[in-house]
Image (cartoon, rainbow, N blue to C red):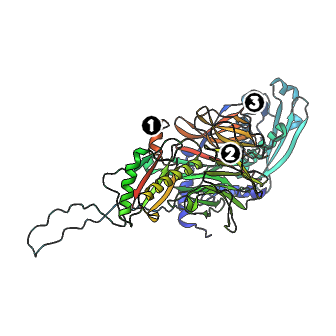
Amino acid sequence: MKRWLTILLIAAAMPGLAGCPKKPTTVPETQAPAAQEGAATGAEGEGQVGQARDLPSEGAAVGAGPAGIATLIYFDFDRSDIRPEFAELIAAHGRHLAGTGSIRVRLQGHTDERGSREYNVALGERRAQAVRRALMLQGAGDVQLTTVSYGEERPAAEGSDESAYEKNRRVEIVYGR
Amino acid sequence: MMRRWCLPVLLTLALLIPRADAQLTVQILRGMAESVPIAIVPLGWDGQGAAPWDVAATVHADLERSGRFRPLPRPQMLEMPHAAAAVDPADWRMLKVDYVLVGQLSSLPDGRVELRYELVQVATGERLLGAALPADRGALKLASHRLSDAVYERILGVRGAFSTRIAYVAVDGPASARGYRLVIADADGANERIMFASPQPILSPGWSPDGRSLAYVSFHTGLPAIYVQTLRTGDQLRVSAYSGINGAPSFSPDGSRLAVALSRRDGNVDIYLITLASKELKRLTDDPAIDTEPAWAPDGRSIYFTSDRAGAPQVYRLALGADERPRRITFDGDYNARPRVSPDGRDLAVVTLDRGAYRIATVDAMRGSLRVLTNGRLDESPSWAPNGADIIYATREGGRGVLAIVAADGRVQQRLAANAGEVREPAWSPFLH
């Protein structure tokens, strides 16, 4: 008993030693593609070099998704089956991945806030896995697809009404890991 | 396990400078109609100047907060005795109190303080308690909580839980710059200590049975992993970082193992056991359903968990070492999850869907009968006090996350709200002495 009181005394007097939170390390999100080189010169001192324009990268290891295709798939409450309206989107991503085996994506699963947190982590994972299987059916390779679930922890929309909830029940397809 | 003192200590000192805006404030919502009237008389002090601590004020606050006592307001006291011999029951009977607590603080030669107290029953004049407790000056608040425990137990016949602690997750900041903190505090919300801070989510804190460590889930590497952190040293040990989900850690009653939820390579979440000393892994469930949120029975012989194998989440019990299928426990309602077992093993606290609202309920572990205790819309994360009398849980008020405490019989309610930001995922410590 006395040891506990002494520990409390030390803890009260020197808060810095009561707990030493580890500085978290976070994996930095890799940025989308990349280098626009500066202009090259032509013949010695002659002529002008025009303004560089962006070339969308294709087939780069750190890649981008198919142009103009959305990267969000939404789900019904407590469901992980993919609604028919998203079949085309999945097919587009699947073909894109099948076409360039070096592209990697992270499938991030989410839920709305209702219900218990760890069950929601599992439900978000189930949604991400459903998207993963659907992409593989379209030709994407196993190694190209990783999944992670945040459950209800990272909502896209704040609020406790259905309009927020339906935006939160989602899988995000994130390119470039 | 290396101790990392330098940079993390600087970070810690910056974080642990007491911030008035970070304290939890406690609000009593509903006490019991038949709460016990008691007078807690300010203690005498035999030293110079003001007493080093107002013990009676802390005991008053503890007993009032429990909802089971109605302490007499100090201004109504007609006299302030310091010893049982000076308590005249007839005088106190007029004030309609059933008990009087009196005492004296004295300095000891070694610099400590002695807290002497006596509890008198007004109806009979009998002295029910009398003791002397030495304490360091800096520990008088804790000594006051121990006195509250003694009074609570003597009158109600249930061990007091005023000297325990709570752990919880605090969240603040805008969505683009969110901060998560794993915090421990006294059971009354005071004395906050930040144990871990991260820009990524923290979930599912759980106490080791000796009260010296916390297990939790953190996403700070970008992926969820399970950590065990020793509170006194701050050492953080990663114990589970398999592919996929690592979640819902729950210490076995002997502290040697964690029950966890893993999905590993097959993407299918099941219950596993991790032996902490060897990291040995043992799989307990293997089915396509989601099996998660394990919780040990206090005898260490079975584990309750959430499973949606019947379509929607319900609570099941798995007997360890027996070659049986898990048995479903909850049959009332369409959604029952996140079981936590009462200290005597007889009841479960669960999250239940009650007429469209997520609420906390108790379930009889043998009979499965369910009783709803709370009335929020998004109540979650119940955790039992170690005396089985109260349940702390997370709820929402004014659009933000707060903690609340309800008596296990539903008759008392309190709120604990952070002055800024949100709080969630509370876990009540075991008895700490």
Decide if residue A91 is in sight here: yes
Residue mark closest to the camera, 1 vs 3: 1
Q: CA distance from mark 3 to mark 2?
A: 44 Å
Q: Is residue B378 left or right of residue B125?
A: left
Q: Is residue B37 above or below residue B379?
A: above
Residue pictured at 51% horizontal, 46% vertical: A111
Q: Are marks 3 and 2 on the same chain?
A: yes
User: What residue did someone put label 3 on?
Assistant: B72
Q: Is residue B127 above or below residue B254?
A: above
Picture quadrant where residue B368 is located? top right
Q: Identify the element where label 3 is drawn.
A: loop
Res B433 label: none
Near-viewer residue (A92 or B64): A92
| Quarter of the rendering occupied by the N terminus of chain B | bottom right
Q: Residue at x 57, y 57 (%)?
A: B245
Secondary-structure class at tag 2: strand
Residue B316, position in %: x, y?
70, 47
Which of pointers 3 and 2 indicates the residue nearer the eye? 2
- Total numbered labels: 3
- Mark 2 surroundings within 10 Å by alpha-carbon count, few (fewer than 14), some (14 through 19), many (20 or more): many
Q: Which mark is residue B315?
A: 2
| Amino acid of disc 1 | Ser
Comparing B176 with A22, the one in front is: B176
Label whose residue precedes the other's in the sequence (3 or 2): 3
Mark 1 = which residue?
A: A163
